[in-house]
Image (spheres, helix red, strand yellow):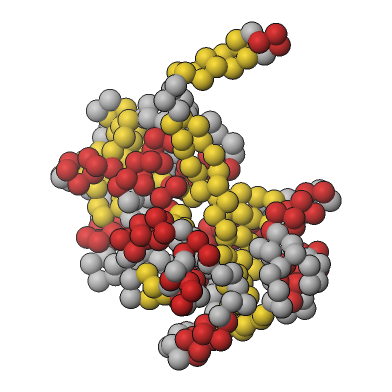
Amino acid sequence: MYKSEEIKPRSIKNTNTIIESLKKMDAEKCKLLFVFDGGAFAGILTIGDIQRAIINAADMNSPVSAILDINKVYAFEGEEIDSIRQKMYRLRAECMPVLNENKELVDVIFWKDAFKDRLETDVREKINLPVVIMAGGKGTRLKPITNVIPKPLVPVGDKTILEEIMNQFESIGCKNFYMSVNYKSDMMKFYLDHTEHKYDIEFFEEPKPLGTIGSVALLKDKIQTPFFVTNCDILIDQDFRDVYDYHIENKNDITMVTAVKSFHIPYGVIETGEDGLMTGLKEKPDITYKINTGVYILNPELINDIPENQFFHITDLMEVVKARGGRVGCFPVSENSWRDMGEWPEYLKMIKVF
């Protein structure tokens, strides 16, 4: 029998809302919750379930019972442990609920217990897509430290933010990095030339500030596959292979990673119509937005849409794509999965994590 204290912090009611569940995952630093209907086990809710619901425009204030996958794979009482391990390995499941014949929860087998000799659940196929890192800014919001070193070399823990970003992409198979540089570029080149790493880095220098995507015009004819673009001051706790799968399956031209951010309004919010007549009243609502995190996937032909040697933002490129009927997709992650080092308060939070 499983110990209830192991899953209690990660348990919710089926009446909890989607946004409440997402916040619960952030608070518990997990990507899976156990859902109960009263005292009865109703199922497990994963971050993937929530992400698919958001992509499909689900109301974030609707209960999780509306998005629970009733076809989830579980183990059953009396099932051989090897069979359970095979299910967990195939699904990359961090844990496997065990049900009895009445579909009551009688045990939970965690990956760390089933695979004591293999702590990592990553059994997925690697992808080797190019990664473009926008590292040319002056980092003025992090002065005075950026008066001395460029923002990409600011340390977080034992490594620089730049190394943490590249290591995350390398862990899913990415080997080829293109780095847009300008401010203190010689220092960055020197540091990376004298640092051991497993990937190839090609620097390209913008002659002047060209916006959030303008310098990528310098990569024309160099990239032939979809590629990642990332700012140099953010980290996202997300397997980017999921983002790539969504990009391909949805036939997007651009996919933007967005953070789901919720704001609590401590007042009654009034909705009005013609003649100022009240049409609705919401008491102290939570308002949810999707925030641009600064990580994207672009199709290679979009490089030709970026004007050469002109100031050009990624938002300008999105408008070009939308104007011709193209697809700009948004892949959601939770608020706390996104760490932005761009300003001092956020930087201090990030180094506490590391």
The answer to which image quadrant residue 14 occupies is top left
Q: Nearer the viewer, residue 203 or 150?
A: 150
| Residue under the point 22% across and 60% down | 113
Work out whether residue 73 can be spotted: no
In the figure, 148 relative to 141: above or below? below
- 162 on left or right of 292: left
In the figure, 217 relative to 54: above or below? below
On the image, the x and y values in percent for residue 265 come to 45, 28
Q: Nearer the viewer, residue 331 or 264?
A: 264
| Residue under the point 25% across and 61% down | 112
Work out whether residue 339 can be spotted: yes
Q: Nearer the viewer, residue 119 or 115?
A: 119
Q: Nearer the viewer, residue 202 or 118?
A: 202
| Residue under the point 25% across and 71% down | 117
On the image, the x and y values in percent for residue 95 come to 30, 52
Q: How many marks?
A: 0
